[in-house]
Image: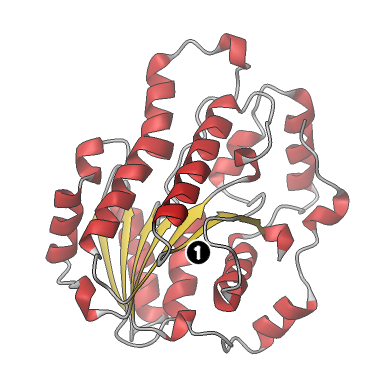
Amino acid sequence: MLQFNAEDFVVENNEEQAFRLNPRMSGTFFLKKTFCIVTGASQGYGASLAEKFASLLPANSALLLLARNADKLKGVTEKIHCQSPDVSVHFHKFDQSVLQECSTENLRTIINKSNISPSDFEQCIIIHNAGVIGDVTKFTWQIKDAEMVDHAMKVNVTGAILVNTAFMECCDGTESMAIINVSSLAAIQPFSSWSIYCAGKAARDMYFQVVATEKEAVRVLNWGPGPLDTDMQARCRECADDNIRQYFTDAYKQGKLLSCEESADKLVIVLDRNDYKSGSHIDVYDV
């Protein structure tokens, strides 16, 4: 059962207010010359994260934005160019459900076409934001569409795993490496009628916990961004479960959903502190 309290939607605290007024970092995460890949970067949370990171990273850092919609990617890229001209921004059309596109060979080709050499950077980061919610209009005993299940698992699990392998191979040997998995409360709590999404997010969280266990030098974070006011969240308001549908409909109408910018600011705080256990799941409301 979905369990939120009204106070869960209060996100501004003294530290965040101070950050908004004075965005200088106390740690070193955003001081390193960085190569950062963002998947699902054409809109919503992925676009907000790309813009936020570009505004904080030092000059001569580079962002590579990946998503299915090239036109929207171009728009995000142009916006970042205007706001953060000292950071190099590149984009490439990319579909995480097409597993051939998730290979090391393909990612290396994309990086090379962007004239990026990961070894030129002090730090390499990937933000795994690409994902789909699947069919939330059915309960578990009603799911019969194998193609829908297969597509959701390819995007949310198989594709993410393969892209992560490609990232680690392409950036092998760099001084510092960080992996940020955009997770969800649905990874650790069952939501009625969200079975495909919950299963995919849970599998992805556990995979990245294993990455953290195996690769102690790599910083890994499973980040729960909270209920965001995005197109995907609108799909949540169409789900089969009456209580969850009503809950998120009320939150939307009452303006209690988080903006992507608010959640991105919280993630920045976590990364700047850098005191989390690698592989842990941290929710926006934990900050």
At which x and y percent is residue 28? 49, 84
Q: How many marks?
A: 1
Q: Secondary structure at mark 1?
A: helix
Residue at (27% x, 61% y) in the render = 91
Where 86 falls versus 96 (above or below)?
A: below
What residue sits right under mark 1 in the picture? 48
Residue at (71% x, 85% y) in the render = 18
Which quarter of the picture shows residue 47? bottom left
Instruction: Residue 72: tell me if it is visible.
Output: yes
At which x and y percent is residue 191? 68, 31
At which x and y percent is residue 101? 21, 43
> Closest to the observer: 101 or 190?
190
Display coloring: secondary structure
Which quarter of the picture shows residue 124? bottom left
Q: Left or right: where does residue 6 sit relative to residue 157?
A: right
> Closest to the observer: 28 or 114?
28
Residue at (21% x, 75% y) in the render = 119
Where 208 falls versus 113 (above or below)?
A: above
At which x and y percent is residue 278? 52, 61
Quadrant location of the N terminus in the rendered image: top right
Quadrant location of the C terminus in the rendered image: bottom right
